Amino acid sequence: MRGFDWDDIQVFLAISRADWLTVAAQQMSVDHSTLSRRVAALEKALGVKLFDRSSLGFVLTPESERVLRAMPRAWRVSRCACVTGSTMHRPV
């Protein structure tokens, strides 16, 4: 596994909560193409596919479920709480 940008984890969490890339982008006040690139970068860094993309939105893969379980709960909650209505570059 290569290094990754922690902001990419924030993007991953936002999309996993919203189920839709466009909704997560609106919540984070960024363009959806930015989030798409960040997810692709994180998937490449981790070597796993994090989401199945479909007409029903973004669905977590078994690999991404493991990534979520590996994160400490307090970190997931605190980071997700700061994502809603903020930008990716605001300090947490």
Image: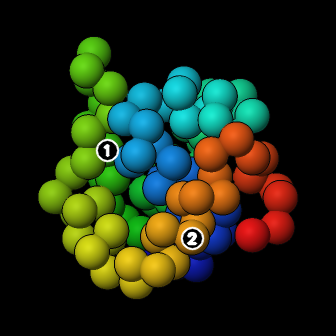
Figure quadrant of the N terminus: bottom left
Query: Looking at the picture, does residue 50 appear above or below residue 65?
Result: above
Distance, label 1 to label 2, CA atoms, is 22 Å
Depth check, mark 1 against mark 2: the one in front is 2
In the rendered image, the residue lying farthest to the top is 55
Q: Quadrant of residue 27?
A: top right
Residue 21 in the image, given as x and y percentages of width and height: 49, 31
Residue 84 in the image, given as x and y percentages of width and height: 62, 45
The mark that comes first in sequence, 1 or 2, is: 1
Q: Residue at x 41, y 46 (%)?
A: 17
Q: Residue at x 63, y 70 (%)?
A: 6
Q: Quadrant of residue 53?
A: top left
**Secondary structure under badge 1?**
strand
Q: Residue at x 54, y 24 (%)?
A: 22
In the rendered image, the residue lying farthest to the right is 90
What is the number of the mark on residue 68? Answer: none
Q: Quadrant of residue 37?
A: top right
Q: Residue at x 29, y 60 (%)?
A: 64
Amino acid at the residue labelled 1: Phe
Figure label count: 2
Amino acid at the residue labelled 2: Ser
| Label 2 neighbour load within 10 Å: few <14, some 14-19, many 20+ | few
**Secondary structure under badge 2?**
helix
Residue position marked by numbered label 2 in the rendering: 78
Residue 62 in the image, given as x and y percentages of width and height: 16, 58
Figure quadrant of the C terminus: bottom right
Residue closer to the observer: 40 or 19: 19
Residue position marked by numbered label 1 in the rendering: 51
| Label 1 neighbour load within 10 Å: few <14, some 14-19, many 20+ | many
